[in-house]
Image (cartoon, rainbow, N blue to C red):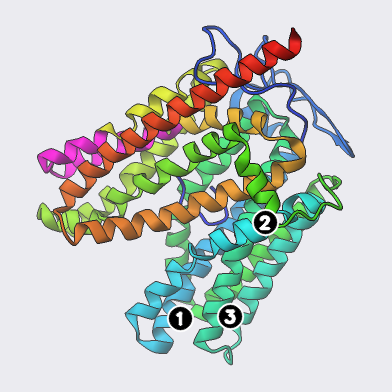
Amino acid sequence: MPTNDPRAPETAPAPTRAPGPSAPQGATAPGVTATGQAPVPALAGSRAPAPDPAATGYRAVFAVREFRFVFVAHLFSLLGVVVSELALTVLVYDLTRSPLLSSLTFALGFLPYLLGGTLLAGIADRHPPRRVLVVCDLVCAACVGLMVVPATPVAGLLVLRCAVAAVAPVFQGTRIATLADILGEGELFVLGRSLLRIVSQSALLAGFGVGGLLLTALAPRGAIAVTAGTFLASAALLRHGTVRRPARSAGKREGIGGTWGVLRDRRIRALMLLFWVPPLFVVVPEALAAPYADEIGASTAALGLLMCAMPAGTVLGELFAGSALGAATRSRIVCPLLLTGFLPFLLYALRPGLAVAALALFLAGAAGAYTLGLDAWFVAAVPEEQRGRTMTLMTAGMMTVQGIGMAGAGLAAEFAPVHAVVVGTGVLASLCLLGLVAEVRATERRDAADRHMTSG
């Protein structure tokens, strides 16, 4: 369902709230006209280009020139993050011979997200988005460049790792908001977000493979130096391939108060929790894949299959939903997928073998297709002047809860069998999501009543 990508897993005013799960049969999805075409909004400083009428689905997204630059820049920055993480972990271990410090290096990719996502979220709206994206890439390039310097101590390497992670939610939130500028708020935005998520899931596996190859040919510092070039390439693509747009709320310095202001909106808060809660639980079987393989006596090769099953399901589920389903259908299946997405975890009650366990994870991953419809609801619910801040907060929360979920899974497995932990996770997640879906329905009914009173 979620992505583990720390930089992956991206405007115009929304005329109305998005139809929620209680929308009547035949209602159009948020930001989509009755003909099924995404509106082309007018923007300050630029206009989102109309898609090629001959292009449909994901082809229509790639028909937008500016998106192609964002997409390639995403590949470069994602490759830089994954390879630098792997190489830095190896470098710290080579310098200290400490497994604790080596694993801490990787864990630091999660910890600063909450800090950066709350304290720095306002940057995404106070400054021109292109400038924010380019500066974030340059900060990352500078940090990994300093990692290459032999005189940098281990403590300095860890601080630099934290700095890269701290700016990541600002980069990601600004990119999501910018996608709405480039593609509009409707169908193209949803498919553009889907493409970046698909690439993130796929590139995680490819990135570790590329990193492994680089480390066979280069020393860890040499591999890290290569990633400085990928961040610079991403910055150049964003600087020269995207349009300069003005800040959404220039001059406003709300600080942490602005972040709490976003969360005070009941509907935005409910939708944001729908982004946060599934990743909290979905990481559990992946975090416990190694002990579960040991529990059932599976081989090391089987562990790789368990680790790949859920990302494969996520990619195929998103591809199917994005290419075969219409916007209205994707909106209608959000809640059913959320409420059933964790039921495959219950198969672990049988202590299944490799094939059934991998199937359960694949099905859970495929249920992540709910995110396409949820993206449409979310972008329509957030006011444009708060969009960068809100998207930054949303992505920071997603990464933070994944770290919490992994730690919680390990703690629970100290006191209960692994298969029982996974089953309990499925039950608890389903109950939490049942309550959240009810809350989203309530906010939709409230908004519908407010619109009725206003129109009357």
Instruction: Give coordinates of residue 98: x percent, y percent.
Output: 35, 84
Quarter of the image where the N terminus is located: top left
Q: Is residue 28 magenta?
A: no
Who's the residue at 73% across and 27% down the image? 14
Of discs 1 and 2, which sits in the foreground?
A: 2
Which region shows up in magenta? 344-369
Callout 1: SS? helix
Placement of 297 over or under 432, stated as above or below: below
SS state under label 2: helix
Q: Position of residue 250 (x, y in %)?
A: 85, 50
**SS class of the residue under badge 3?**
helix
The residue nearer to you, when weighing 296 against 396, is 396
- Horizontal side of 282 relative to 186 (left or right) equals left
Q: Is the magenta stretch mostly helix, strand or loop?
A: helix
Numbered label attached to residue 91:
1
**C-alpha gap between disc 3 and disc 1:** 10 Å
Q: Which mark is drawn over residue 147? A: 3
The earlier-in-sequence mark between 2 and 3 is: 3
- Tell me the quadrant of the picture where the C terminus can be found: top right
Tag 3–tag 1 contact (CB < 8 Å): yes
